[in-house]
Amino acid sequence: FGSSRKPPAKSGRCPPQDCSASVPPLHGRVAMGVNCTKETTRDAYGTWLEEDCWVECTSNCVSTNLGKVRSIEDGCTMLYWPTTGSVCYGVNDIYYYGVRRVMADVNGWKMRPGQLVQSEDGHQGMVRDVSELYATIIFGRGGWDGADGTYTQKDVNKAGLVVVGTVRNRTCSSCM
C-alpha cells in the first residue's frame, strides 16, 4: 500500500465526499456508531471542532499562524489560514497536519495563562487557565457580563476579548 500525500484541496467550496466509502459496510449499511453528519468532526487529538473555533498545526506545518474553522460539511473541514487562505481538510489531512483546537482571542492570538485581555466595552481581566475548549478569566470589579469565570470560544467572541499584554514578575530588582 503505497502512500503518496497530496495537499488538501484549495478552494472556497468543499468537494463532495461519500461517507460510506471510507467506512466498511456492514450487511450493505454503514456500521452503527459511525458519524456521517455534515456538522461535526474532531481534531487530531480527539477534541470536537465547530465553526468559528481556532486551530493550530502541530506537525508537517506550512503555517505558524492559527487557523479558523469556517465550515464543516460533506467530510470537509474548511479552515482559513492567514498565509494560505481557505483550505479544505478531510479527516486524513487533519491527522497528517496534527490540527489541534486552541482557545484564541477574536483576532486569532492564542490564549495563555498570565495574559491580560480586554473586552469590547473596556473591561480588563487576566487569563488564569486555558484548555482546548475553555479559558478561565479573572476580571476585576465589574468584569464583562458581571462575572469572572470560564469562557468558551463563543463567549470570547461575544465579549470581543483581545489579548493586550502579559503579567510580568514584578519583584523589586534593587531590593535584592
Image (tube, helix red, strand yellow):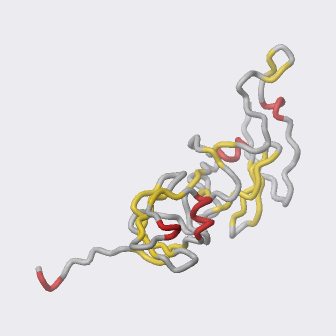
Which quarter of the rendered picture does the N terminus lie within?
A: top right
Residue 157 found in image quarter: bottom right
User: Does residue 33 appear left or right of residue 158 in this picture?
Assistant: right
Task: Residue at 72% x, 62% y: name it.
Answer: 80
The quarter of the displayed image where residue 105 is located: bottom right
- When the figure is inspected, residue 21 is found, relative to residue 118, above or below; the finding is above
- Left of 82 or right of it: where is 164? left
Q: Camera-side residue: 84 or 143? A: 143
Point out the image quarter for the C terminus: bottom left
The x, y position of residue 62, in whole percent, is 65, 61
Tell me residue 40's x, y (percent).
Answer: 71, 43
175 relative to 49 in the view: left or right: left
Is residue 157 among the parts visible in the rendering?
A: yes
Query: x%, y% of residue 135?
Result: 48, 58
Q: Position of residue 51 (x, y in %)?
A: 71, 55
- In this rendered view, identify the residue nearer to me: 16 or 171: 171
Looking at this view, is 116 or 140 the one in front? 140
